[in-house]
Amino acid sequence: MKGIIEATTEKYISALLPPRPPVVREMERYARQHDVPIVGPACGRLLYQLARLIDARRVFEMGSAIGYSTLWLARAVGERGTVYYTDSDPANARRAKSYFRRAGLLNRVRILIGDALESLESVEGQFDLIFNDVDKRQYPKVFSRAVPRVRVGGLFITDNVLWAGRAARPAAPGDVPTRAIQKFNRLIYSSPKLFTTVVPLRDGFAVCQRIK
Ligand SMILES: C[S@@+](CC[C@H](N)C(=O)[O-])C[C@H]1O[C@@H](n2cnc3c(N)ncnc32)[C@H](O)[C@@H]1O
């Protein structure tokens, strides 16, 4: 997908990234060939790093597709950690499961098929980290449902908050995804419960820490 960073800089960052395990490379290849909008290796590393920084053990992901971002998070949570994978497409879940098995990480992942917001309601307790990458029109609703489920000190992270630059420009009345992202961005910056930074990597990653 087209991100917001200038192409030469994007290429430069990409060339600096250390080699990834073969399963991860295969997922990247599959995503490229089949137009699956994964976060990619630079943001995958950021997810991994942020999860490690807060010593995350219990992670919930909303919108997991073939499990690429899930896999980065599963590596980060360690042997006793758990990552909830959610996707509405059973075919995605089957493919993701085979990647988790091959990566030796299946025992850290719980696979939930169906609407991610409903799946979140079906699992009790709080999370160290929630990663949101569902349908962009749902972002404001995700804000209200997910933030209370992150423990104080934990992270609520969201992909695509710059939306290929469209978030920064006035949106047409019918452009529902852009309007939803703009509303979401206002919510995460104005919430007294969150301390927010948008990292303009790839398509914009919102990193919000729950502070109360
Ligand atoms: C952008 S992709 C996720 C990519 C993944 N996070 C990664 O980086 O590897 C979005 C996925 O979310 C799923 N999805 C969108 N809205 C959803 C919802 N409300 N509940 C469950 N899955 C949803 C779609 O089927 C799609 O596979």
Image (cartoon, grey):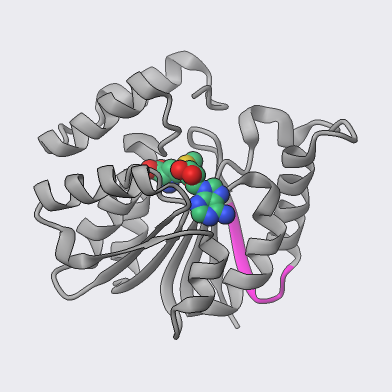
* Left or right position of 200 against 102: right
Residue 65: percent from left, percent from top: 40, 44
* Residue 158 visible here: no
* Left or right position of 155 against 164: left
> Of 31 and 193, which appears nearest the observer?
31
* Residue 169 visible here: yes
What residue occupies the far right of the structure in this picture?
173
Residue 156 higher or lower than 186, as above or below: below
The number of callouts visible is 0
Residue 178 higher or lower than 188, as above or below: above
* Left or right position of 20 against 199: left
Residue 57: percent from left, percent from top: 28, 74
The magenta stretch spans residue 194:
yes
Q: Which residues are magenta?
A: 191-197
Where residue 56 sits, quadrant-wise, is bottom left
Quadrant (top left, top right, bottom left, bottom right) of the C terminus: bottom right
Q: Residue at x 12, y 38 (%)?
A: 21
What residue occupies the far top of the structure in this picture?
8
Residue 46: percent from left, percent from top: 36, 48
Q: Residue at x 75, y 48 (%)?
A: 180
> Of 204 and 70, which appears nearest the observer?
70
Q: Residue at x 44, y 79 (%)?
A: 123
Q: Residue at x 25, y 31 (%)?
A: 17
The magenta stretch spans residue 21:
no
Residue 195: percent from left, percent from top: 60, 67
